[in-house]
Image (spheres, rainbow, N blue to C red):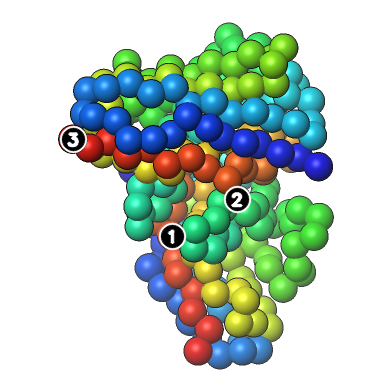
Amino acid sequence: QSVLTQPPSASGTPGQRVTISCSGSSSNIGSNTVNWYQQFPGTAPKLLIHSHYQRPSGVSDRFSGSRSGTSASLAISRLQSDDEADYYCSAWDDSLNGYVFGTGTKVTVL
Amino acid sequence: EVQLVESGGGLVQPGGSLRLSCAVSGFTFSNSWMTWVRQAPGKGLEWVANVKQDGTEKYYVDSVKGRFTISRDNAKNSLYLQMNSLRAEDTAVYYCARDRIDSGTYIDYWGQGTLVTVSS
C-alpha cells in the first residue's frame, strides 16, 4: 500500500536540476521525518536523505531534501548519467504504526 | 563493515509456510530496531514489519497481520520472519533492514534481499 504519492517519472539532461515531489498526510509527512532512497535495478535500496534533509556520509551534496507541511521534495542538481535510478520517499505513519513508502519515481537522464 | 544477509527464500505453494532469516554483523544488533521490507516484481517498496530491540514490541502491515511473525535472537545477531498461509500476492523480494531512531525515524542499512515466490 503506497500512501505517499510521487510522479512516476522525471527526466533531465546532464547538468540540469531535477525535482521529485512526495505528497502525504498529517499522520506521516506532517508529523514525522521524511527519508529518500535510491534504487538501481536488481539491487537493494540505498538511503539517500534522512530526517528531511540530512545526507548520510558518502552521499553526494548534489542530492538535497526538503519538507513543507504534508509534502516533501528531493532535488538532484548537476544531473549525471549514473543518477538514472528509481527514487522512493518514506516516512513513519502514526495511524498505520508503520513505515509508508512513496509510489516511486524513475529518473531518466536524456 | 555492516552486513545483513538474508536467507530462506524460495518457491512455495499457496497456503504454505516459509521462514526467512537475516544474519547481521558490523553493528550492535541488540541496540537496534529491525525491519522487513518487501518488493513485488516490478513494483514499489512495502514495509512489512518491525521489532523492538528486546522483541517486546512488534508492528505489522495490515495485509500480513495474523499470518506473519517477526522475531529476533540477540544472542545470534539474527532476525526472522515466519510466513504462514502464503498467498500469490506475497511474492516479492524480502529485505532485512535496520531501523534508526535519532534525528528522525528511518531505515538505514539494507540486506541484498531474498526472493519468495508463491505459486502452484
Residue B17 appears in the picture as rendered = yes
Q: Which residue is mark 1?
A: A104
Identify whether B49 is placed above or below A46.
above
Between disc 3 and disc 1, the foreground one is 3
Measured from the top left, where is residue B109 in percent x and y? 67, 42
Disc 3 with disc 2 on a shared chain: no
Rounded to the nearest angstrom, the CA distance separating label 2 from label 1 is 13 Å
Between disc 3 and disc 2, the foreground one is 3
Identity of the residue drawn at 64% across and 82% down = A80
Label 2: few (<14), some (14–19) or many (≥20) C-alpha neighbours in 10 Å: many
Left or right, B26 with reference to A3: right
Amino acid bearing label 3: Ser
Residue B46 appears in the picture as rendered = no
Pinpoint the chain carrying mark 3.
B
Q: Which residue is mark 2?
A: A35
Task: Tell me the SS state at disc 1.
Answer: loop
Rounded to the nearest angstrom, the CA distance separating label 3 from label 1 is 30 Å
Task: Tell me the SS state at disc 2.
Answer: strand
Amino acid bearing label 1: Gly
Disc 3 with disc 1 on a shared chain: no
Q: Quarter holding the N terminus of chain A?
A: top left
Identity of the residue drawn at 27% across and 36% down = B118
Identify whether B27 is placed above or below A19.
above
Identity of the residue drawn at 39% across and 35% down = B10
Question: Which numbered circle lies on residue B120?
Answer: 3
